[in-house]
Image (spheres, helix red, strand yellow):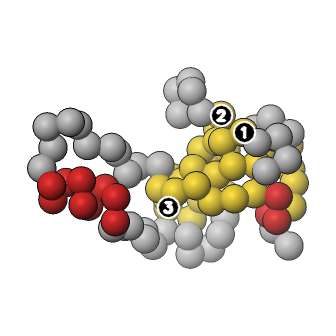
Amino acid sequence: MQLFTCPFCGPRPETEFHFGGDADNDRPGAEASDASWTDYLFFRHNRKGPAREIWMHLSCREAFLMERDTVTHTVTATLALGGEA
Ligand SMILES: [Zn+2]
């Protein structure tokens, strides 16, 4: 079992975490085209290699940014949201 590090609680088993989505899927503005909204809402990039993702630790219910490699599953950073993520 892999351990993820919650920025608030420290290392915990991966089963305590829930994937929240791609951190770089930026919400389009109100004037964006239908194609931009379709891309934002329905298509995922499914990157191979380094990725920035939003995860939630279910025990403390805090969301945070995780930087990890989707090939090796190596976590390189976990950062609290709201500051300089
Ligand atoms: Zn936590």
- Image quarter in which the N terminus is found: bottom right
Residue 81's spot in the image, x, y percent? 59, 33
Q: Residue at x 38, y 51 (%)?
A: 25
Q: What's the residue type where badge 1 is placed?
A: Glu
Label number found at residue 80: 2
Q: How many marks?
A: 3
Q: Amino acid at mark 2?
A: Ala
Alpha carbon separation for disc pair 1 and 2: 8 Å
Q: Secondary structure at mark 2?
A: strand
Location of mark 3 (residue): 50
Q: Could you say which is closer to the camera, residue 79 or residue 42? A: 42
Q: Are marks 3 and 1 in contact (CB under 8 Å)?
A: no
What residue lies at 66% left-to-right and 42% top-to-bottom? 63
Asked if disc 1 and disc 2 are in contact, CB closer than 8 Å, the reply is: yes
The answer to which of 23 and 34 lies nearer the viewer is: 34
Q: Nearer the viewer, residue 13 or 72?
A: 13
Residue under the point 69% across and 49% down: 56
- Is 68 located above or below residue 6 in the figure? below
Q: Look at the numbered disc 1 and give the secondary structure of its residue.
A: strand
Q: Which residue is mark 1?
A: 62
Q: Quadrant location of residue 32? A: top left
| Disc 2 Cβ-to-ligand 1 distance below 8 Å | no
Left or right of 18 in this view: 27: left
Horizontal relation, residue 81 to residue 9: left or right? left
The first of marks 1 and 2 along the sequence is: 1
Crowding at label 2, few (<14), some or many (≥20) Cα neighbours within 10 Å?
some
Q: Would residue 75 be seen by someone viewing this image from the given angle?
A: yes
Q: Give the mark nearest the N terminus, 3 or 2.
A: 3
Disc 1, ligand 1: is the CB inside 8 Å? yes
